[in-house]
Image (cartoon, rainbow, N blue to C red):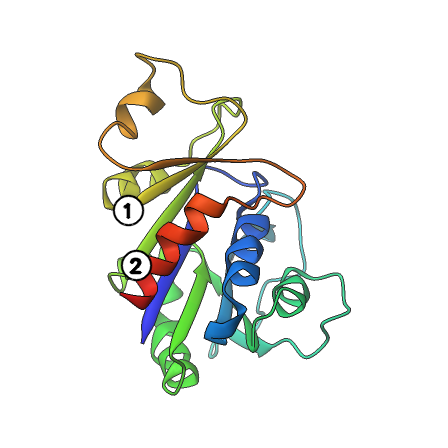
Amino acid sequence: MKRVVVGGQSRNIGKTSLAVSLISAMPELGWTAVKVTLFGHGICSQDGRPCDCAVDDPDHPFLISRETDPDGSSDTSRMLRAGARKALWVRAPQGRLGEAMPALEAYLRADEHVLFESNSVLDFFTPDLYVVLLDPRVEDFKPSARRLLGRADAFAVSGSTPSAGSQLSKDTADRPVFPVAPPCWSCDKLAAFARDRVKG
């Protein structure tokens, strides 16, 4: 199994859009796409707002659901529209994703190419490719994302390139940096880099 992880420095900076662009660049790989959402006290870690993603059963604190509607408005629907063969949504309380991982691994056992939208899964495996989305215009930088920066294989940068001497410039100095931009977030060079890592 080849695993690609798309992470980001913060919420709402385009991680799903970047994941979708990578899926659409390589539809022949028959991706399984996995979106991971962590929650706590009714607040979603994806966007920091109150949400209904929480699982209320203490005996089964996580939920894995399969998306079946490619025409829907959810992030997993977008992944299907982009060409994913299968899309899963994993929901778990913050700090308890590990309880969901054995069940998730069972779901993925027969899959050859899996793309995860999540920084958190890196606590459980080493992917074939980890791409981190950065936006120098966004001040927020999650501590968990900064802790994992050293494991990034490449950076996708939205907005301007990090200015010389900035912390982001130092963070990205020794690895490939690919500029991306909405609305399509596509980058041929990033897609080629990802393809080489996944197919190589």
The residue under the point 54% across, 73% down is 88
Instruction: Point out the image quarter for the C terminus.
Output: bottom left
Q: Does residue 6 lie above or below 108 as drawn?
A: above
SS at mark 2 in the image: helix
Mark linked to residue 153: 1
Q: Can residue 135 be seen in the rendering of this structure?
A: yes
Q: Residue furthest top?
A: 165
The residue under the point 56% across, 77% down is 86
Q: Position of residue 90 (x, y in %)?
A: 51, 68
Q: How many numbered discs, if any?
A: 2
Q: Does residue 117 lie above or below 185 as drawn?
A: below
Query: Within 10 angstroms of label 1, few (less than 14), some, or many (20 or more) residues?
Result: many
Query: Within 10 angstroms of label 2, few (less than 14), some, or many (20 or more) residues?
Result: some
Disc 1 versus disc 2: distance between alpha carbons? 10 Å
Q: Nearer the viewer, residue 161 or 53?
A: 161
Q: Position of residue 73 (x, y in %)?
A: 75, 61
Task: Identify residue type, mark 2.
Answer: Arg
Dividing the picture into quarters, in which one does residue 14 lie?
top right
Q: Nearer the viewer, residue 183 or 126?
A: 183
Q: Can residue 58 be seen in the rendering of this structure?
A: no
Residue that badge 2 annotates: 197
* Nearest to N terminus: mark 1 or mark 2: 1
The residue under the point 45% across, 52% down is 191
Instruction: Point out the image quarter for the N terminus.
Output: bottom left
Dividing the picture into quarters, in which one does residue 147 lie?
top left
Q: Position of residue 194 (x, y in %)?
A: 38, 55
Task: Identify residue type, mark 1.
Answer: Asp
SS at mark 1 in the image: loop
| Disc 1 + disc 2, Cβ < 8 Å | yes
The residue under the point 32% across, 20% down is 167
